[in-house]
Amino acid sequence: MTVKQHLRTTYRRSRGLIATVRQRGDAAYCPCCDSWQRSFRDLVMPDRQCWICGSLERHRLVAILFSLRPELTRPGRDVLHIAPEAMLATRLKRHARSYVGGDLTAEFGSARIDVLDLQFGDGSFDVVVCNHVLEHVPDDRRAMREVRRVLRPDGWAMLLVPDVQLPHTAETPDIDDPDEMLRLYGQRDHVRRYGWDYLDRLRDSGLEPEVIRLGGLITPATASVCRLLKFGEIEPLFLARVATP
């Protein structure tokens, strides 16, 4: 663990301990860290981020999915976690045979991992988790093919991307102005905003996507207490498997 990672982990744990005392309540529940709080922290929108583990809506949705479909995290699997989220890493590590987590700079995990050129052999992993990464990557199709390459035939990949609403993906490769990217795509380091043709890109890369809408599987009370709505909607989850010929 690098000094930067150690400091981040120490800060996160300290913040969690303080929040456990200060924010104790029964109005908001985080399934990632199994904690009840008076409310969540404001982040862009009110009452959104767990004070203790830092989860957002998408992380809590994934935690609920894992509870509803335990076969996804059954013991003995080899897991690759790209740009690892701490609040999901704990769950993924718990029963994994092996776990590798990292990103381009090894800032959030122990390994340096380039999703455009994964340094692993074909079929190395049963599980690949790569959430909110592809919208940052210039050549997303190449990244999808790399995920497909390292995934075993009976494995699965979680490839969440934000705010999929329109039919077609919006992207302008020659734009390099962060302010314009913010205006077009919602964030200064996003290079596109995915539409529903995202599913076609996954299929073209050899992956068969499954769209999971948890809104139809949980009660409105659960959605409310876990603060799962983002901009008034529950975001879809995208699970993918190796496409069969």
Image (spheres, rainbow, N blue to C red):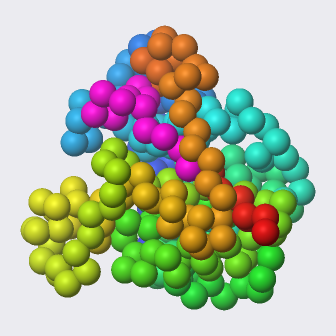
Point out the residue furthest to the front here.
245
**Main secondary structure found in the magenta portion:** loop
Residue 127 occupies quadrant: bottom right
Is 238 left or right of 49, judged from the image as shown? right
Residue in front for this viewpoint, 167 or 186:
167
- Expressed as whole percent of the image width and height from the top left, the position of residue 69 reads 74, 35
* Residue 181 % position (x, y): 17, 68
x 87%, y 50%: residue: 75
| Left or right of residue 169, residue 142 in this image | right
Q: Nearer the viewer, residue 49 or 79?
A: 79
Q: Is residue 12 magenta?
A: no
The extreme right residue here reads 76
Residue 5 seen in the figure: no
Q: Is residue 50 above or below residue 138?
A: above
Split into 4 quadrants, where in the image is the N terminus?
bottom right
- Where the C terminus falls, by quadrant? bottom right
Q: Report the span colored magenta.
A: 227-238
| Residue 70 occupies quadrant | top right
Residue 54 appears in the picture as rendered: yes
Query: 103 above or below 99?
Result: below
With 220 as the anchor, is 42 left or right in this view?
left
The residue depicted at 33 percent of the width and 61 percent of the height is 169
Q: Give coordinates of residue 184: x percent, y percent.
A: 16, 61
**Vertical order, 114 against 59 (above or below):** below
Please state the horizontal and vertical placement of residue 56, each as a whole percent of the image.
42, 41
Q: Residue at x 84, y 60 (%)?
A: 154
